[in-house]
């Protein structure tokens, strides 16, 4: 039986660890993975960027994320793991939980980056919210 997993990724070492975990465990836990990158555009507005600046930054960020998830997909493909990619806009934890729920993923694999506030040092702010808010199993990869 193949497990359908959602794998939120970014440019962090944590994402690399998650990919290594998937490839290492592929024979024990066969998966099909959806690599999801979320571009948090609302943070740009919060920091006072002008609309033209936000548009330019958004376009660059989305293009960067599309290249990144495709690079990760190719890594998994070379290891024999079937994966697809997608890039979404929004608040990362909210988007991850929405996609995981609406598309009935069986598992979310996420690696905390540990760069959040002191209250989130244990998991990282996005991973912490995903663990608290997702209604399906979430596996944290350290």
Image (cartoon, rainbow, N blue to C red):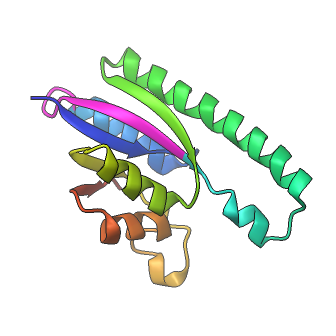
Residue located at (56% from left, 68% from top): 115
Specify whether 54 is left or right of 109: right
Q: Is residue 141 above or below residue 83?
A: below
Q: Is residue 27 above or below residue 114?
A: above
Q: Is residue 75 above or below residue 109?
A: above
Asked which quadrant contains residue 62, the reply is: top right
Residue located at (47% from left, 55% from top): 95
Q: Tell me where residue 116 appears, x and y as whole percent.
A: 55, 72
* 7 and 55: which is toward the camera: 55
Farthest residue, direction left: 1
Farthest residue, direction front: 102
Q: Which quadrant is the N terminus positioned in?
A: top left
Q: Tell me where residue 38 appears, x and y as whole percent.
A: 55, 49
Specify whether 121 is left or right of 20: right
Residue located at (38% from left, 43% from top): 7
Number of marks in the image? 0
Q: Tell me where residue 35 appears, x and y as whole percent.
A: 43, 37
Specify whether 13 is left or right of 41: left
Farthest residue, direction bottom: 119
Q: Which quadrant is the C terminus positioned in?
A: bottom left
* 98 and 115: which is toward the camera: 98
Does the magenta portion include 45? Answer: no
Specify whether 63 is left or right of 140: right
Q: Tell me where residue 3 appears, x and y as whole percent.
A: 18, 35
Does the magenta portion include 36? Answer: yes
Asked which quadrant contains residue 2, the reply is: top left
**Magenta part of the protein: which range?**
26-37
């Amino acid at each position: 039986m193949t497990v359908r997993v959602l794998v939120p990724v970014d440019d962090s070492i944590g994402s690399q660890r998650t990919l290594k975990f998937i490839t290492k465990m592929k024979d024990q836990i066969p998966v099909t993975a959806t690599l999801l990158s979320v571009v948090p555009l609302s943070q740009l507005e919060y920091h006072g960027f002008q609309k033209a600046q936000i548009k330019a930054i958004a376009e660059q960020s989305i293009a960067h994320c599309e290249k990144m998830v495709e690079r990760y997909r190719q890594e998994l493909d070379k290891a024999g793991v079937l994966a697809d990619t997608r890039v979404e806009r929004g608040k990362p934890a909210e988007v991850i939980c929405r996609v995981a729920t609406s598309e009935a993923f069986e598992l979310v694999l996420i690696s905390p980056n540990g760069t959040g506030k002191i209250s989130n040092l244990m998991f990282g702010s996005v991973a912490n919210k995903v663990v608290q808010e997702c209604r399906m199993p979430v596996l944290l990869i350290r």
